Amino acid sequence: MTANAFPPPKMGEPYLLTPGPLTTAYEVKQAMLKDWGSWDDDFRAMTRDMRHRLLALLGEGSEHYDCVPMQGSGSFCVEAMLGTFVPRDGKVLVLANGAYGLRAATTMDYLGRAKTLLDKGDYLPPRGDEVARILADDPAITHVLAIHCETSSGILNPIEEISEATYAAGRKLLIDSMSAFGAVPLEPTKIRFEAFVSSANKCIEGVPGFGFVIAKKALLESSKGNSHSLALDVHAQWANMEKTGQWRYTPPTHVVAAFIEALKLHEAEGGVAARGARYARNRDVMVAGMRGLGFETLLEARWLSPIIVTFFCPADPKFVFSTFYDLMKQKGFIIYPGKLTVVDSFRIGVIGRMDEHVMARVVEAAREALAEMGVDSAAPPAAALEERKKLAA
Ligand SMILES: *Cc1c(COP(=O)(O)O)cnc(C)c1O
């Protein structure tokens, strides 16, 4: 891949170093310059093509799964998946280590269905042995919900060991792979799961407007009548799509058109492996450069996802995050505030239509911004490094 395979966003837009919405290819934006009739054969064919392309990303064993797109943002899909696949008398073990795990737990409360929450705090990973212990102690639990990449810290959770512990105990795994699918492999021959969700505006690099549920066909067939919600009933959406080729209610036609273009670019790049490799290079170049300026990552290398990275704010009192943000924006980069409760932090996303040459410029922009603020060293406060030791322990 040559450097100019990733031209800067047109019309002077900054790069979005955020985990979706993110910087999309010009071709993706251009695909929206046309109107489609939602009932028309052309659009039905687009929906069919999109579902097939998404399923193909699972690799071997994909024939046992089907793909059901759902209108709305990613959280709508999480709610739809939980409401449709967890029976009303089911009980879910929600594994949380950040905002998205906690949101899934809140969703269970709204659904009025039973749950147990394993809350590991800001970023510690839920481990297989913990899951095994909780499942052994509570036979009422029917399902486990895991977050693949917890985007609030950027940790890549140990989904393999969570899956093994879940099925060893005879329970079922549901995955929020929102910010991982498309760049991190999720193959049914390697990781056992019943269903997962992702959305248009993350690693496939589409624009926001819908998400999709990928679930075992047998599960889709058996989940009629479970849902608490008309609009969020995955079974009803699937049954209607199978019968008529149409979405039940107004589909985001332009977003689907853009997403198909994004899927073609994903395929042309070399699929999940190549997308993941580009993001990993983005991360490695960016993290090495930021470390060179004195910044420290929250997570040790083994937990760093190729999606988004959390950095501690520097200890130097001249560092003010809002000023740093504004300076980075002036230099063409939108960064992301942190979500840690204990120490100040910020995040830099490495997904979207950009490569390591762009990431090198991000580091250069950060160096200039620090100099303009009069910050000599970006080293974090001692308390931040103490916090990080917990993870190593
Ligand atoms: C983006 C994301 C979601 C969904 O968020 P929306 O704002 O509803 O699109 C859910 N889980 C994770 C892990 C995410 O990264």
Image (cartoon, helix red, strand yellow):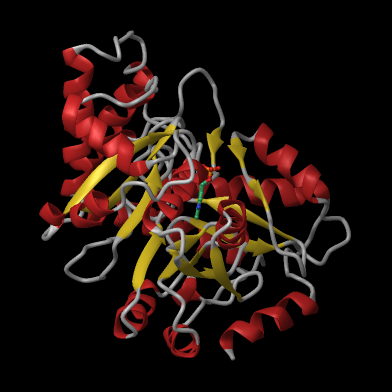
Residue toward you, 68 or 179 = 68
Indicate the quadrant where residue 259 lies: top left
Q: Position of residue 66 (x, y in %)?
A: 21, 47
Residue toward you, 186 or 325 = 186
Residue toward you, 239 or 46 = 239
> Looking at the figure, which quarter contains the N terminus?
top left
Q: Is residue 275 left or right of residue 150?
A: left
> Looking at the figure, which quarter contains the C terminus?
bottom right
Q: Tell me, yes or no, if residue 270 can be seen here.
A: no
Q: Position of residue 257 (x, y in %)?
A: 30, 22
The residue at the far right in this view is 317
| Up-down relation of residue 310 to residue 7 (above or below) | below
Q: Tell me, yes or no, if residue 266 can be seen here.
A: yes
Q: Position of residue 300 (x, y in %)?
A: 53, 77
| Up-down relation of residue 191 to residue 18 (above or below) | below
Q: Residue at x 25, y 54 (%)?
A: 222
Indicate the quadrant where residue 252 lies: top left
Indicate the quadrant where residue 316 lies: bottom right
Q: Residue at x 36, y 47 (%)?
A: 225
Q: Residue at x 58, y 61 (%)?
A: 105
Q: Position of residue 318 (x, y in %)?
A: 87, 55
| Up-down relation of residue 108 to residue 146 (above or below) | above
Numbered label tally: 0
